[in-house]
Every structure is written in C-alpha cells, then in structure tokens.
Image (cartoon, rainbow, N blue to C red):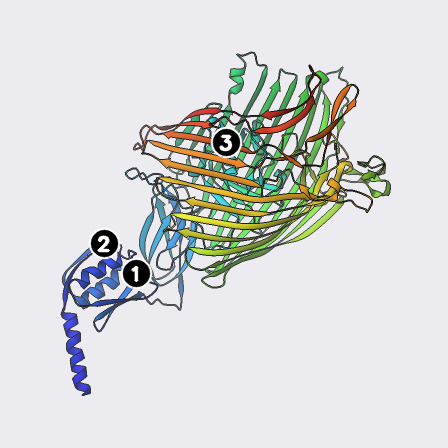
Amino acid sequence: MKHIILACFSLFSLRMFSQNVTVAVDSKITLKELFKQIENQTDLNFSVADQIDTNQKYFTKEDIYKDTPINELVVALNKSSSIEFSIAGNSILVKQKTLNTTKKSKLSGQVLDESNQPVIGANVFIKELARGVVTDANGMFSIELEKGSYTVRIRSMGFKNIEELVTISDDMTMNFVMKDDSQQLEQVIIIGTKAVDIKNPQMSVNKLNMEEIKRIPVVMGEADPLKAILTLPGVTNGGEASSGFNVRGGAADQNLILLDGAPVYNDSHLFGFFSVFNADIVSGLDLYKGGIPSKFGGRVSSVLDVSQQTGNFEEYKINGGIGTASSRLLVQGPVKKDKGSFIIAGRASYAHLFLKVTDIKSTAMFYDLNAKFNYRLSANNTLAFSGYLGNDTFEISKRFTNSYGNTMGILNWTHKFSDKLDTKLGVFYSDYKFSLGIEMEDFEWKSAIKSYGLKYNWNHSLSEKFKLNYGIDGLYYNFNPGVLEPTTSDSQVNYRQLDKKFALETSAYIDFEHQITKKLNLRYGLRYSMFYRLGAEEISTYENDMAVVYNPIYDIYEQGTPTGTVSYGSGEVISSFNNFEPRFALSYAFNENTSVKASYNRMAQYVHILSNYQSLSPMNVWTPSGPFTKPQLLDQYAVGYFKNFKDNDYSFEGELFYKNVQNRMDYIDDASILGNNNIERVILNGKARSYGAELLFRKNTGRFTGWISYTLSKTEQKTPGRTADEPGIANGNWYLSGYDKLHNLNIVTSYALSPKWSFNTNFALQSGQPVTYSNGYYEFGGRNIPNYGVRNANRLPVYHHLDIAATYTPKPDKKKGWQSYWVFSIYNVYGRKNAASMTFTTNDDTGDNETRKLSIYGFVPGISYNFKF
C-alpha cells in the first residue's frame, strides 16, 4: 500500500512539474497579477505567508518565460525576486527568503543630488523589511542587513524616487544620485516625504524644507523660514512685525536658535518684517518643541536648528530675486572640482532709496551676507566654514538713529573613523550689537553680547539596534549691557559704562537610541551642565540681603537699599550653578502606520533677556544668572498619537504637553530695564506653566498639498510673595502670561494647477494677546493718568489674516540656461486691521480719555522675480 501511495504521489508531482506556462514579469507587475497569469494556465493554487503583500511589486527586471515548465519557472523567479517560491502538492508556497542570520552585513553610502551635494534627511527604506534610516547632514547612511537580496527605495521631497534591487553578501558601499523632480510635469503631482516617522521615538519636532517654505505667502512676497514656522502647531509670535517667536507658551529668549550649529542672538530684520535667514541659502530647519535630544541645551522652550546648503562641487551656478522691498543674489560653485565648494548669498533692502525722493525723512534698511565653504580633505575628513554678517539701520529725520546686527562664524571638522563611528568638532564665534543715538540729547547708547564656543560630538553605532551619541560643549560669554557716550563736546550726558558681565557655560551629554523590539524604541540620555558667573565685576549688597523690598504702606514693590559692594577679580567665580538634565522618549508602533509616543525632558537656562515687553525688540539686553538671578529650570512631559494614511499620502500628529518652569524672571510694576546697572533691584523670581493639545493633519502628495494645525493651550505665571505679608505679583495668583494664546489655527495649502501655475494660501487665526487695560484714571498735574488693573487680565482683539500667492513659471521644461519664475502675493487679503497694541491716553484737543489701537499691516501686495542660471 505504501508503494502504491508513493507511486501515485510521484505521478502527481511529475504531472505538476510537466505543466508548462508562459509568464511575463517586469517592475510594474504585482504579485497578485503574477498569480493570475499562472492560475489561468494551470490548476495550481497559491499559499502566501502573512508578511507578504500581494499588492506589492517584488520584481525589478523584465523577463518573459515562454512555455516554461513550472518547476523551472519557480527556480527562475527565486533568482529574480526578493521572495521565495516553492512547490508543495498542488500549491505554490510564497514566503520571505530565509537569510543567513549568523552574520550581518552593512550597507552604507551617500545620497547626493545631481550637483554632487548631499541630500539631507532622505529616507533610505528597505522594502522587504519595512524599515529604513534617514541620511545625516552629509547625506550619509548605514544599515545592517542579513545576506540576501533587497529592494532599496530612496525618497526625498523635490527628487525622483530611487528603487534598486541590491544583493548583500558582505559589507558594501553604494552611493545614490537623486534627480531633481520638484514637480512631475506631465501629471503635476507634488512628491512629499512628510509622512510621520512612526518608529522614531523623537516627538514634538517639526521639519520644513525650502520647497515648503517658499510656498507659504508672507509680507512683501519674500520666502521667510522664520515666518514659516509660525504656521506650525504650538508656535506663535507677539503680533505682526514683531521679533521673536513663542513655542508652547515660552518667551522668545527661551528659544535656542542655531545656524549651522552656532547660536544666533537676534532673529529679525526691520523690527520683525524679515528674519535673518535668507531662504535662498537655507536647506531646511528642524524645530524641537519637546522631547529635545541631550545634545541640545541652554534654553528651556525650544531649539530651532537651521542648516545652510553646501555649495556645488561640479559647476558654477547663480540664482537670485528682485522683490518689492529687497533683492537677493546667490553664487555657488567648486573651489576645486569634487574636492571643495563655496556658496555665498547676499540680501539688501532698498526701501530707503524711494523714501529719499519723498517728503518722508525717515529711513530703514538692512543687509546680510551668508557664506559656506566645504573642503573634502579625504574620504573620511571634511572641513566646513559657515559665516553670517547682517546689519539694520533705522533713522527718523536724523534725530533718532538705531543700528543693530549679528556676526557669526563656525568652523567644523568632520572625521569618520569607520562606518560605526564618526565625530564632529566645531569652534565658533557669535555676537549681537545694538546702538541707539538721539541727536537732541547728543548721546549714543551701545550694548552687545559676544560668545566663543566649542562643540565636540561623537556618533557611535554599536549595532543596528543600539546607537550612542555623546559629546562636550563649552561657551564663554562677554556681556556689555550698555555704554553711554556723548556725541558732542557740549552734550549734557556724561560717559557711562554699565558693569560688563562674564560667564562660562560647559556641559557634557550622552544619548542612547535603543530598539527594544520591532515595535518598541527608546531614546534616553543625560546632560550635565555647569555655569560660572565670572569677574571682573563689583556686586552690590543690600540691606537684609534683599534687592527688592515690599512697601506695605503704598502696597508696592520698591528697589532695595544698597549697603556696599563686593569686588571680584578677573576670572574669579562670583556664582556657580550645575544641573543634571535627564531626557527620555519612547515610541510604540502598533503597526507600520500607527504609533504612540511619550517624552520627558529637563533643561536649564542660564542666560536671559531683560525685557518687560511681551515681544522682543532690538533694544533687549542679555544678562547671565548670578547672585540674584537664578537659572530657569524646565520639566516638560508629552504624549502623542501618530498615524500615516493611504500609503503615506496623509499623516496625522496629535500631542498633549505640560511644561513647568522654575525661576521664571518677573518684574515689579514700572520696572526700569534699559540702563539699569543693578537689574536685580526690579526683578522677582517666579514660576510658569503651560499645557495644551496640538493637532497637525497633512496632505503630503498630489496636486493639492498642505496642512492644518491647531493648538489649544494655556500659559500662566505665578510670582507669590516671599513672606506672608507680601502680596507678590497679581496677589500671588496664577495670571496669564503675555505669550498665552488659547486658540491658534493655521491652514496652509498649495495647488499645482499646471506646470506653469501654482497657487498657495495661508490662513492664520489666534486668540488676542493678553494685555493690561486701564480700569480708571486719576488727575495729576492737570492731566488724566490711567490706572491699570490686574496684570494681563484683558486681551487684544482676535488676530487673523488670509494670505494668497501665485507662482508663474514661464518655461517649466527648461532645465539649463536662464530659468525664472514670478511670485505674486497678497498679505491680508481682506485688509484686517489687527491690533498690535492698545494705548490709553488723553485727547489733546478735547481733553477726553480715549483708547487708541495701533495696527501695522493692512492689505499688502507683493511681487518678486526670481531667476537662476
């Protein structure tokens, strides 16, 4: 009987193997379509493993098998695909190929564009394993794989996708060149890469590249990276034409702003009309709002990490633009082909030229210059220098002059020890200077902050599942809070130099990235920071050691009574602080499209801006922590839900956050900031908190793309009395911070009508900024003086505006020679008069009390002509 069964099975198998089929395969055929071809010609069935997606394409080469025995076809298919076919009875089994698990090999390389520049943040994805990595700042990537054949897919916004079958038998290096494809002209489909990284534990971070930034309409029609981040959830500013930005209720000085790794202390031109970041040379930006990695420190609200492009290593190129208020020009090219490159970009405004031919005697202008030089010393060593120089000048009838600007330079050396270990050493200098001159008083006021720093970072990939980042930082500060200089011999002002301040901030950090399972990923680390307030300086002492005292008779806080000074020599430590700053983040992926994340981070901030205004101005003065000014300490918690839809065409991010800040600087009523040599006499230490929800929904691909962001949050401060007899600020209760915006909605859209025309819109709506209104008046000297109520108990009217822009490209198919496009924009289409401030005063003619609203913008059209060759 056994022999009969065996004979029958053999005859059956021979019948199966003897069946011939004709099959055609290519890179466009899905597994389901292959099955249909075979099933139509045979009586075979298919049995498919769970991890195999029959709607996917597993073949990369075109082959036609004519009248081929089924067993030979199976052997051929196994050689040309990344999956395994086998015959069992009347079924063909399909499963993932069994790979050698005893030894893993490394696939590494670099992703470049057609100009031989690194493509930063490109997604290198292994199709069969449904996992991948992202290229670093040099376009480099590395991933460990078991031996076998894999489909490598590379995607990055503005480039054509790459898909290539790679066979891994040992460690190998491959470079990929991505071709420019910001638009697929035939179909007009915009390609994006903004799907959520589901498995990465990093949360509370938003990334924008220049393709997106240039599509957001702004005042005067010029793309602006800093204005673009205001469309993201959790980010607001103090109103139109205001400097700085606020993240999750934080103050503007709580943001660490980096340009190629060096700090920038002032972020605006023309009092907020423009930012200091030239969109032509910026390659992209990352805004960290929470879950901040251990390598960043020194601020308690956010980190804005802006990177500049690398110059072209192959050929010379020029691009620029002529706009309504300013013009730009960028030049780049090789210093030595394939070895060194440069890129230089400059901007200048020229509104002052038109004002000279009018009766307006005021003028305002700015210029800036960005530069970056790269040189490849060898395959493992690269030098890069980045620099920035910018300045603003504002003048009113030559009676009032104001000048301010940034200077920054950083030299980076990158060394690659191996595929698993690389380092970056950077030294930098950055300063910010401000001057104010008043002709009728014959004096000039100057202030500055200078810093010198060093960073040494190490990236160590111990395995595919365990990575280690560590490093050290050092930063030396020189603060000049102000010098008063007479400008004429008969000036009534005497020369006066406020006490200069010096400080040293050092830190060390370590950060672990750990894949626990395929679903659970962790990132955890620790930063240890130290801060030293240094001499030479004389520190005032006060009666009862209180620089601020409470007067119960008048129910006000007053400046304390000095009793003497303590002198500290040059370099002598006046005060010292140190803090451990733990960081933790995790992600748990339910599947390839859905995950939850959570994070905690503590951060310390040792330098502060002295300002009792709610938005920054160029006159703000930086000061270090010291005997009376404690460092700010942040604890932030966040949880979130993240999901990609329809093959990453859509994505959703939702987060809840809670922030608590200790030692938040607060000011007594009528505090005098500018020119105060003893600022501790008007400062009280309080605390702040912020909590809320952020939502971000994106459409990433197609003719119509964009995002909707919404934030519901509350931000409060509390400065209680130091004793039971003191009321504190606002009676010691929680009161609204000047940065509170209960509602914040932004809708950004982009529609590609044709290769020649695209249209973009931006709608913004925010709750009015908290302010303190007058609740009455009293008469003094024949004038009505307003009396103010509880701090920030009122709000300005709701803020909103709609902006539109149209981009016209006359010759979209032209890829060489002179290429150009026009941008037509309207800021505030319906002319909303948003309130920048409310002033309570007396009408000089009638003597009546009145409230005056100040608005900055109405309906503002703009046009710019942009070119490259």
Instruction: Give percent across and percent down for residue 736.
Output: 66, 40
Q: Residues within 10 Å of mark 2 (few under 14, many from 20)?
A: some
Residue beneath disc 3: 801
Instruction: Give percent across and percent down for residue 591.
Output: 42, 59
Instruction: Give percent across and percent down for residue 779.
Output: 78, 23
The relative height of residue 522 versus residue 658 in the rendered view (above or below) is below
The relative height of residue 760 versus residue 474 in the rendered view (above or below) is above
Name which residue lies at 66% across and 24% down.
Answer: 436
Task: Look at the numbered disc 3 and give the secondary structure of its residue.
Answer: strand
Task: Look at the numbered disc 2 and give the secondary structure of its residue.
Answer: loop
The disc, 2 or 1, on the residue closer to the chain's N-terminal end is: 2
Instruction: Answer with left or right where residue 223 lies relative to residue 637.
Output: left
Which image quarter holds the N terminus?
bottom left
- The number of numbered badges drawn on the structure is 3
Task: Look at the numbered disc 1 and give the secondary structure of its residue.
Answer: loop
What amino acid type is highlighted by mark number 3?
His
Residue 259 visible somewhere in the drawing? no
The disc, 3 or 2, on the residue closer to the chain's N-terminal end is: 2
Instruction: Give percent across and percent down for residue 199.
Output: 46, 56
Residue beneath disc 1: 82
What amino acid type is highlighted by mark number 2?
Asp
In this rendered view, identify the residue nearer to me: 301 or 249: 249
Tell me the distance, in whole angstroms, between the alpha carbons under discs 3 and 2. 52 Å
The disc, 3 or 1, on the residue closer to the chain's N-terminal end is: 1
Residue beneath disc 2: 26
Tell me the distance, in whole angstroms, between the alpha carbons under discs 3 and 1. 53 Å
